[in-house]
């Protein structure tokens, strides 16, 4: 009885070891084969990808895109094929864009804030500081109001005053300049 | 939660800017119903071709402000090396730390929650006076500023006058 068991124990151990190695061999080899196959699938060209890339880079021909895809096995997140050097047409477009720019694309501040009624007549320019002082010390020291609408109006008035003051200053400078030359 | 932190902070900054506005700067939300969109007016610094001008800009704050910086866009014709032709301002204080792969800017110059709207606007004001030639946003303006300063200044002055409706 004890004799049999002493023979069996190493046998069982060997069988377990061989079994484990066999299992491992099958497992690893099947896994490697699987991954190899998936790599091959990836390397095969996907027409949808080629189409997408040709839309992104219309200046490149499809042959080159296919080649890039094949080499990289699909587009990486930052796909950037070698672009041909900028042609003279694209550099020629830049002065055109610059020539378009100078035309004012934004309305001036007077139109934008509807200040035309407060500009021009000197009476209006007099009335504005008067109005500011009428609002007690709010003109001198802009105070924070607890009321939401009041705050909004206060901010708007500060904006308008800033613009009108700048405009008045510029006009004065113009007049001084004209007086100096005359 | 993050939104309420952001709006509370923006409200505090708005209050501070109203009670103690820096010289030549007016800023506040376009409407308090949406505190994440502001409008700012910046006066051109004296002794520069921008002198005498008032320049409107729009500030848009992210929902996770002050962790992330706002964006700033001039809503007037702005001819400046560091302002994109569409009006977007390119200045280090508006860049989140870690944004600059070229390491032109020190981390201390970039955005961090201890910065504020006031500091942005003051930085932009000094940017008007002293363009940063290292990383121009408007290449044509940068070139003109570098090579034909007279023409650059004339063009800026024209924009100033046009902006005031003159």
Image (cartoon, coloured by chain):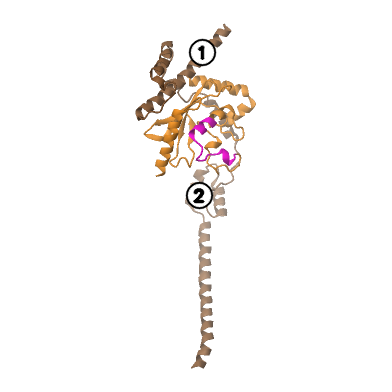
Chain colours: A brown, B orange
User: B19 or A127: nearer the eye?
Assistant: B19
Give the vertical position of B85 relative to A54 (above or below): above
Residue B77 placed where, x, y %?
50, 26
Crowd class of label 1 (few under 14; some 14 to 19; many from 20; radius 10 Å): few
Q: Secondary structure at mark 2?
A: helix
Q: Secondary structure at mark 1?
A: helix
What chain letter is assigned to the residue under label 2? A
User: B148 or A175: nearer the eye?
Assistant: A175
Residue A155 placed where, x, y %?
41, 26
Upstream in sequence: badge 1 or badge 2: 2
Label for residue A50? 2
User: For mark 1, what is the residue?
Assistant: A172
Crowd class of label 2 (few under 14; some 14 to 19; many from 20; radius 10 Å): many
Magenta residues span B105-123
CA–CA distance in space, label 1 to label 2 = 65 Å
Q: Report whether mark 1 lies on the same chain as mark 2.
A: yes
Outermost residue, top side: A182
Q: Is residue B88 magenta?
A: no
What chain letter is assigned to the residue under label 1? A
Give the vertical position of B114 relative to B141 (above or below): below
- Does the image show residue B165? no
Residue B161 placed where, x, y %?
51, 19
């Amino acid at each position: 009885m004890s004799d049999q068991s002493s023979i069996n124990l190493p046998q069982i151990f060997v069988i377990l070891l061989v079994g484990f190695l066999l299992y491992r061999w099958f497992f690893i080899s099947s896994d490697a084969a699987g991954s190899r196959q998936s790599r091959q699938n990836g390397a095969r060209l996907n027409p949808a990808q080629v189409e997408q890339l040709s839309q992104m880079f219309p200046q490149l021909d499809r042959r080159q895109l296919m080649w890039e895809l094949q080499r990289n096995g699909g587009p990486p997140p930052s796909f950037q094929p070698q672009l041909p050097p900028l042609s003279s047409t694209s550099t020629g477009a830049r002065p055109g864009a610059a020539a378009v720019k100078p035309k004012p694309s934004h309305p001036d501040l007077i139109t934008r804030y509807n200040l035309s009624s407060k500009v021009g007549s000197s009476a209006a320019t007099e009335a504005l500081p008067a109005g500011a002082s009428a609002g007690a010390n709010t003109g001198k020291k802009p105070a924070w109001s607890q009321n939401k609408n009041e705050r909004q109006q206060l901010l708007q008035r500060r904006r308008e005053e800033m613009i009108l003051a700048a405009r008045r200053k510029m006009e004065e400078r113009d007049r001084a300049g004209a007086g100096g030359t005359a | 939660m993050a939104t309420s932190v952001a709006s509370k902070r923006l409200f505090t900054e708005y209050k501070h800017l109203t009670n103690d506005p820096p010289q030549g700067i007016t800023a506040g939300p376009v409407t308090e119903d949406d505190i994440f969109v502001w409008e700012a007016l910046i006066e051109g610094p004296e002794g520069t071709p921008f002198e005498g001008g008032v320049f409107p800009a729009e500030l848009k704050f992210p929902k996770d402000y002050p962790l992330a910086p706002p964006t700033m866009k001039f809503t007037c014709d702005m001819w400046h090396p560091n302002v994109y032709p569409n009006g977007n301002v390119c200045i280090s204080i508006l860049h989140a730390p870690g944004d600059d792969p070229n390491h032109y800017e020190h981390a201390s110059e970039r955005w961090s929650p201890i910065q504020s709207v006031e500091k942005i606007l003051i930085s932009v004001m000094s940017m008007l006076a002293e363009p940063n030639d290292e990383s121009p946003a408007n290449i044509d303006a940068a070139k003109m500023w570098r090579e034909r300063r007279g023409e650059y200044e004339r063009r800026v002055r024209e924009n100033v006058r046009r902006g005031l409706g003159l």
